[in-house]
Amino acid sequence: MKYKKVLDACCGSRMFWFDNQDERTLFIDIREKCERIVDIGTHGTIGRKPIVVNPDLVADFRKMPFENETFYHIVFDPPHFYKGAGATGKIAFQYGLLKETWKDDLRKGFAECFRVLKPNGTLIFKWCESEIPLKEVLALTDNKPLYGHRSGKKAMTHWVAFIKSNVAL
Ligand SMILES: C[S@@+](CC[C@H](N)C(=O)[O-])C[C@H]1O[C@@H](n2cnc3c(N)ncnc32)[C@H](O)[C@@H]1O
């Protein structure tokens, strides 16, 4: 099977993409096609049309169906809500929900992302600190982040960059 260069490891409704049909990218999610009208979204999209989750491939980031060292770049934006306000219907639909097993799930997700990344490939991890601090989540991988960006006040959103280095420094 010929793979694309980029992987979105849990694409949801692909909200953050400039082009949500980007031809270089394989979009996967654990959910099969589903759609719903929800009153959340970005400024321009709110309530305008249904939120559609429609991955190219239904797959689990904890056990990805790809060979080692397949992708040049991966974006990993797993669910970040666990028990709090986010655990309600519409937000859960938009972003998914963490389970009791979230630590193990995210540990496996990181491990799988690094397994299927090519050497020197890059991983961008997105995390919203609505309930769980970024620090606790970054502790689930041995890979050292390069740098990041944070925004927002109430629920701080972080974008964190990694590179896959096979050589111990
Ligand atoms: C925060 S949302 C992604 C939002 C997306 N980045 C966007 O721009 O719209 C997280 C997604 O992870 C998916 N997900 C949860 N567990 C998963 C798993 N084990 N494997 C793959 N996808 C998973 C959820 O179905 C949900 O769509």
Image (cartoon, rainbow, N blue to C red):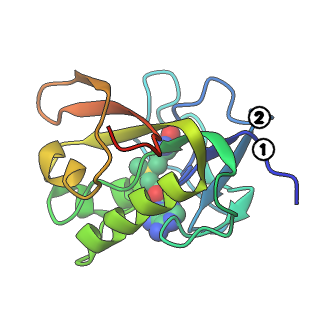
Q: Residues within 10 Å of mark 1 (few under 14, many from 20)?
A: some
**One can see residue 46 in this view:** yes
Rendering coords of residue 55 (x, y %): 68, 56
Of the 4 image quadrants, the one containing the C terminus is top left
Callout 2 environment at 10 Å: few (<14), some (14 to 19), or many (20+)?
few
Q: Position of residue 54 (x, y in %)?
A: 68, 56
- Asked whether the residues under the numbered discs 1 and 2 touch, taking CB atoms below 8 Å apart as contact, a structural biologist would say yes
- Identify residue type, mark 2: Arg
Residue 4 badge: 1
Residue at the image point whose x is 74% and y is 32% from the top: 22
Secondary structure type for disc 1: loop
> What is the x, y in percent for residue 75?
51, 41
Instruction: Where is residue 44? Give x, y as percent.
Output: 50, 21
Residue 120: quarter of image:
top right
Identified by mark 1, the residue type is Lys
Residue annotated with mark 2: 24
